[in-house]
Image: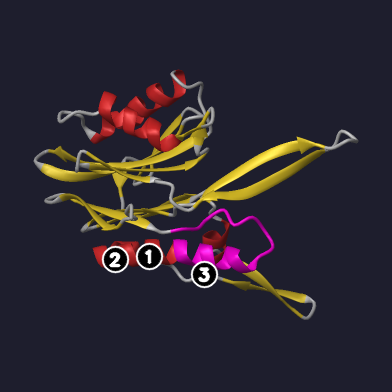
């Protein structure tokens, strides 16, 4: 599992993700029972990708296809399917064709984002692509209109709990606690970067203290896209 967070605000788009690879498998015991196992396989997995300095891609869900890490397939996809003339709104279908038909629809998800010139204006496009479900959703658009906001996928429970309405028991009664709204449309690009890293750091630190599998961890990779400057890395793990 992973946590990938994207924010699309007036100044640009931010895409951020953790680096943990979690390995899961089952073993049969003598009585025929299946025992589930899970370990942290790596804290240096690449989940955030710069495509041609124009687009950004993040992946979550299955981390491999038939035992081969997903990063290798993503690099192959970029080399084979993306050129200087590719537009952002073409990429979701290209992802479906490459990973779905070619690799039998694995349980892999992608965020893909960038800008497209429409009527002489740079317009944000942010998509969620679910290969197994064969679905494509432009997450920064509703009822035909673009908006500023956020979207995240993978290990979303911790973050969702923090910003959702809750009920607290007071004696025998339950009191509604309404979550305060987050005003994404007022975020600067730095605010968006800070929110992405807050979301992932908070998830990592919460999982640390809970009795559960630590599915989010390692360094946080974050990049931004600006209409006038393309893709820039804010933080990125490096080989040493």
| Residue found at x 23% / y 58% | 10
Dot 1 falls on a residue whose secondary structure is: helix
Residue 139: image location, x then y, percent: 38, 44
Question: Which tag is nearer the camera, tag 3 or tag 2?
Answer: 2
Q: Is residue 2 left or right of residue 74?
A: right
> Which badge, 3 or 2, is on the more N-terminal residue?
3
| Res. 104 visible in picture | yes
How busy is the neighbourhood of tag 3: few (under 14 within 10 Å), some, or many (20 plus)? few
Circle 3 residue: 179
Circle 2 residue: 187
How busy is the neighbourhood of tag 2: few (under 14 within 10 Å), some, or many (20 plus)? some
In the rendered structure, are the residues bearing label 3 and label 2 in contact, judged by CB atoms less than 8 Å apart?
no
Residue 78: image location, x then y, percent: 29, 31
| Residue found at x 52% / y 38% | 62
Q: Nearer the viewer, residue 108 or 233?
A: 233
Q: Nearer the viewer, residue 240 or 192?
A: 240
Residue 4: image location, x then y, percent: 43, 51
Circle 1 residue: 195
């Amino acid at each position: 599992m992973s946590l990938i967070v994207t924010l699309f605000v007036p100044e640009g788009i931010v895409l951020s993700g953790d680096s943990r690879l979690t390995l899961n498998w089952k073993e049969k015991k003598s009585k025929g029972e299946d025992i589930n196992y899970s370990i942290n396989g790596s804290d240096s997995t690449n989940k955030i990708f710069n495509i041609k300095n124009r687009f950004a891609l993040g992946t979550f869900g299955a981390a491999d296809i038939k035992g081969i890490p997903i990063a290798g397939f993503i690099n192959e996809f970029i080399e084979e399917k993306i050129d200087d003339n590719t537009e952002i709104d073409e990429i979701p279908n290209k992802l479906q064709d490459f990973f779905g038909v070619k690799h039998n629809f694995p349980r892999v998800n992608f965020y893909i984002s960038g800008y497209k010139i429409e009527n002489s204006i740079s317009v944000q496009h942010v998509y969620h692509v679910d290969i197994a479900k064969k679905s494509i959703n432009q997450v920064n658009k509703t009822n035909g209109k673009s908006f500023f906001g956020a979207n995240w996928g993978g290990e979303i429970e911790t973050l969702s709990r923090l910003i959702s309405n809750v009920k607290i028991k007071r004696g025998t009664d339950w009191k509604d606690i309404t979550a305060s709204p987050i005003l994404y449309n007022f975020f600067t690009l730095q605010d968006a970067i800070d929110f992405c890293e807050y979301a992932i750091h908070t998830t990592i630190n919460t999982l640390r203290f809970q009795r559960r599998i630590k599915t989010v961890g390692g360094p946080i990779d974050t990049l931004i896209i600006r209409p006038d400057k393309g893709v820039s890395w804010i933080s990125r793990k490096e080989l040493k």
